[in-house]
Image (cartoon, helix red, strand yellow):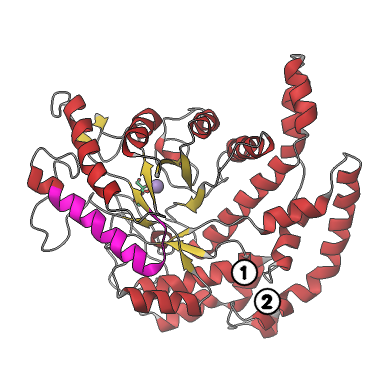
Amino acid sequence: MNDLHSANPRDPDFISRCNAPLRAELEADYDTLTHQLQRRGLEIDPIMHAVADFHVAIPSWGVGTGGTRFARFPGPGEPRDVFDKLEDCAVIHALSGATPTVSLHLPWDQAEPRALRERASELGLRFAAVNSNTFQDQRGQALSYKFGSLTHTDPAVREQAVAHNIGCIRIGEALGSKALTLWIADGANFPGQQHLAYAFERYLESAARIYAALPADWQLLIEHKMYEPAFYATVIQDWGSSLMAAQSLGTRALCLVDLGHHAPHVNIEMIVTRLIRAGKLGGFHFNDSKYGDDDLDAGSIDPYRLFLIFNELVDAQWRRVGALQPAHMLDQSHNVTDPIESLISSAIELQRAYAQALLVDRAQLADCQQRNDVLMAALALKRAFTTDVAPILARARLERGAAIDPLAAYRASAYRKQCAKLRPVKDGSRSGIV
Ligand code: LRH
Ligand code: MN
C-alpha cells in the first residue's frame, strides 16, 4: 500500500487499488458465510443488497473534533467551515458507501444555499434534515434564549424562535432537505422555576406555527431529551411528551429518538415499538452512551442494544407495518478520535446491526414466543447477533464502489495529513461540543 500515500480517498481508482489485494479473501469469506446461512435456510444476497441500500446521514457538526464543557482538543486538519465539512463527509461516503446525505445545523453551517447545494452535488452528497438552534444566543441576536425559546414566557422571544425555525425551513427548501429536526433545550433547573403545564402549551402553540410553515412534503422531527442543559425539567423530556406534541401538531409531525437522550437502562427498543404502533417514528440520532448524553460512537458501548432496535425495525417490516421510513442519522461528538474514522466505523456498526436483525428467524422466534419457550426465543435473537456478518458488510461496500477496508484505505490516503497542510490550525474554542 506504500505507493498509495497522499492519495485522494474519493478517487475510485484509489479505492479499487486498495480493494484489489482484499477481494479474493472477501470472496472466500462471503462464500463460507453463504453456505453457513443456507444451512439456516437464509439466502445471503438479498440481505447484502438490503444492507447496501441502507443509508445513514452524517451530522455536519460531527466531522470536527467535539468537546465537553471542560475542554475541546482540536485535532490536525479540522474543517474550517461547512465546505470543508462537506469535503470530509464525501470522504466518509466514498469509503463506506453508506452516508450519501448530510444533516446541517443552522446557523453553525450558514452559507449561501446555492453554493452549498452545488458543492454537495459535485461531491455526490444530498442534504438530510436541517437542525435549528435556539439553545444558544448568536452574536447580534435581539433576545436571549437563557430562559427558553419556543416556550419562553415572553411572546417576543417565542416569536424570534419561531422565525428562526421558519428561516431554517426556507434554507432547507433551497438545499433540497425534506425535514426540520426540532430539539429545544427549554426547561428548568429548579422546581417552581417553570409552570410545567403552561410551558408545554406554549411549546404546542409555537410548534404549531412552525408546522404551518412546513412545505407539503416536509416532516417535523421532534427530538426529546431527558435533561441537559436543563437539570430539573425539560419541556420535551421524553417520548411521551414528544408523542403528545406530534399527535397534536399533525400527520407530518413525527418523533425522533436520540439514543443518548434517555436515562441509563431505559428500554429504547420498546419506545421504538410504541412509536411505530402510533405511526409516529420519524427518525433516529444514533450514538452510544454509558451514563448521560455521551454522544459516543454507535455500537461502541452496547452493540446488543443497537441490534435490538434494528430487530424491532425489521420485525415491523416483517409484520408489514405500513409507511415505516425513519430517517437514520448519526449524532455523535468525537472528542478523542479522528471524526472521519469514527463516522465511517459508526455507519458500519449500524449496517452490522441491520444485517444481524435480518438474520433473525422470525417464524421460529414467533413460535417460541407463542409456546413460551423462553430460552429458545432469547437464543433466536442471540444467534443472529453473534453471526459475524463482516463479509456481507464488505461485499455491500464493494457493490457500492466503496472500500472493502475503509479505515485502512482512509489511513493509506493520508487524507488527515493532507488536511493538516491545507487547513491551518484555527484557534479553536477551548471548550464546548463544537
Ligand atoms: C441535543 C442534540 C441535538 C442537536 C445537538 C447537537 O443534545 O442531540 O440533536 O441539535 O445534539
Ligand atoms: Mn440529537
- Return the disc, 2 or 1, that comes first in the chain's sequence: 2
Q: Amino acid at mark 2?
A: Ile
Which stretch appears magenta?
159-179
Nearer-the-camera pick, 144 or 346: 144
Q: Considering the image in quadrants, where does the C terminus appear? A: bottom left
The residue drawn where x is 77% and y is 14% is 371
Mark number displayed over residue 95: 1
User: Pointer 2: what residue?
Assistant: 15
Q: Is residue 47 left or right of residue 61?
A: right
Q: Quadrant of residue 321?
A: top right
On the rendered structure, is 326 left or right of 54?
Answer: left
Quarter of the figure with the N terminus: bottom right
Q: Name the chief secondary structure element in magenta.
A: helix
Task: Tell me: residue 39, above or below residue 418.
Answer: above
Describe residue 305's horizontal placement relative to residue 19 as left or right: left
Q: Can residue 387 be seen in this snapshot?
A: yes
